[in-house]
């Protein structure tokens, strides 16, 4: 079966608690806390903002980039993961 | 340690969100890395109505490597081994990403059931059947869904039942009188209804028969 979509109405809405933006997609911990590998609050656990617009804990995304299967890609959008120089 | 926290979160999330239909639990409470997941077969497929159980083993470095998943329920599907339940799916191998979860992995298995890919088979015998004899493939997939996945026996109606519905209460011999003239059953039944013929009568007066024929010709 083939379906052709003739019209499509995008409905945008705001959610104050939009979880995807303030949670690290890899460890699922809020960005205001450290990644689960950092044992103590206050450990230096920086957040890395990718040029593609996706952010992760530095420690989390490092673990991913070091796996062979990552091929250096962003876990969200599969573009090459490059971070913004601050 | 880090992994366990995330797994706990995932399990919590799945038990809270029943709307996705994806469920999972630990098989034995000492070992968080061995889970059992399950979901319903997708509607409008031979798997509809069945419950599919998946054995899930999480490697130590999960979520950086994909969960190892295998169908525990036997499935007749080109991308699933009919013998071992092994799965051929890129999301669970080369295309895995650590932002995916057990729930999204189960969802991708459900979509795999709905969209078989016989050109990249896990089970060559099943794939051959699907390509060469799709009707036989559907029947066998359905039979396995009924036998192993507990799908309800929603067998298609028998020929006799189909005929009975088609006749809509009119007598076979009455309808045959008109189909013998070359009209289709469906058209005859609707002409009989339109002319106000009572259901169950075996023969028609000449003027009534004439009216039915007029309708049949008018409707052509
Ligand atoms: Zn993280
Ligand atoms: Zn950290
Ligand atoms: Zn990205």
Image (cartoon, helix red, strand yellow):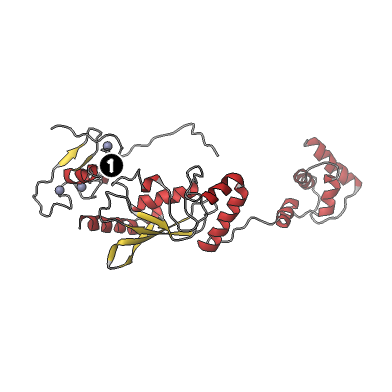
Which residue ends up furthest to the front in the rendered image? B124
Which residue ends up furthest to the right in the rendered image? B206
Which residue corresponds to the image point at 27% horizontal and 53% vertical from the top-left? Answer: B62
Which residue corresponds to the image point at 28% horizontal and 39% vertical from the top-left? Answer: A71
x%, y% of residue B113? 48, 50
Query: On screen, B116 above or below B8?
Result: above
Query: On screen, B132 above or below B67?
Result: above
State whether residue B25 appears in this view: yes
Which residue corresponds to the image point at 52% horizontal and 36% vertical from the top-left? Answer: A3
Left or right position of B6 against B211: left
State whether residue A15 appears in this view: no
Left or right position of B212 against B89: right
x%, y% of residue B202? 86, 55
Q: Nearer the viewer, residue A33 or B104?
A: B104
Left or right position of B16 against A49: right
Q: Residue under mark 1: which chain is it in?
A: A
**Disc 1: which residue:** A70
Left or right position of B209 against B162: right
Q: Nearer the viewer, residue B160 or B26?
A: B26
């Amino acid at each position: 079966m083939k379906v052709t979509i003739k019209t499509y109405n995008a409905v945008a809405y705001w959610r104050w608690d939009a979880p995807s933006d303030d949670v690290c997609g890899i460890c699922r911990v809020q960005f205001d806390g450290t990644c689960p590998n950092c044992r103590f609050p206050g450990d230096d656990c920086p957040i890395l903002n990718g040029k593609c617009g996706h952010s992760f804990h530095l420690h989390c995304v490092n673990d991913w980039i070091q796996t062979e299967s990552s091929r250096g890609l962003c876990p969200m959008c599969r573009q090459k993961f490059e971070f913004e120089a601050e | 340690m880090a992994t366990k926290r995330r797994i706990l979160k995932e399990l919590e999330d799945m038990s809270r969100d029943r709307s996705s239909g994806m469920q999972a639990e630990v098989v034995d409470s000492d070992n968080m890395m061995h889970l059992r997941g399950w979901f319903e077969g997708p509607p409008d497929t031979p798997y509809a109505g069945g419950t599919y159980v998946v054995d899930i083993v999480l490697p130590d470095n999960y979520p950086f490597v994909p969960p190892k998943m295998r169908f525990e329920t036997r499935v007749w599907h080109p991308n699933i081994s009919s013998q071992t339940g092994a799965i051929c799916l890129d999301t669970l191998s080369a295309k895995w990403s650590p932002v995916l979860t057990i729930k999204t992995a189960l969802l991708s298995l459900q979509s795999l059931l709905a969209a078989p890919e016989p050109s990249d088979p896990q089970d060559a015998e099943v794939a051959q059947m699907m390509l060469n004899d799709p009707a036989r493939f559907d029947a066998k997939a359905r039979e396995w869904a009924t036998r192993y996945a507990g799908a309800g026996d929603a067998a298609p109606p028998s020929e006799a039942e189909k005929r009975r519905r088609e006749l809509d209460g009119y007598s076979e011999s009455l309808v045959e009188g008109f189909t013998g003239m070359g009209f289709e059953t469906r058209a005859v039944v609707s002409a009989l209804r339109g002319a106000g013929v009572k259901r169950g009568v075996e023969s028609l007066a000449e003027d009534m028969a004439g009216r039915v024929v007029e309708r049949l010709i008018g409707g052509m």
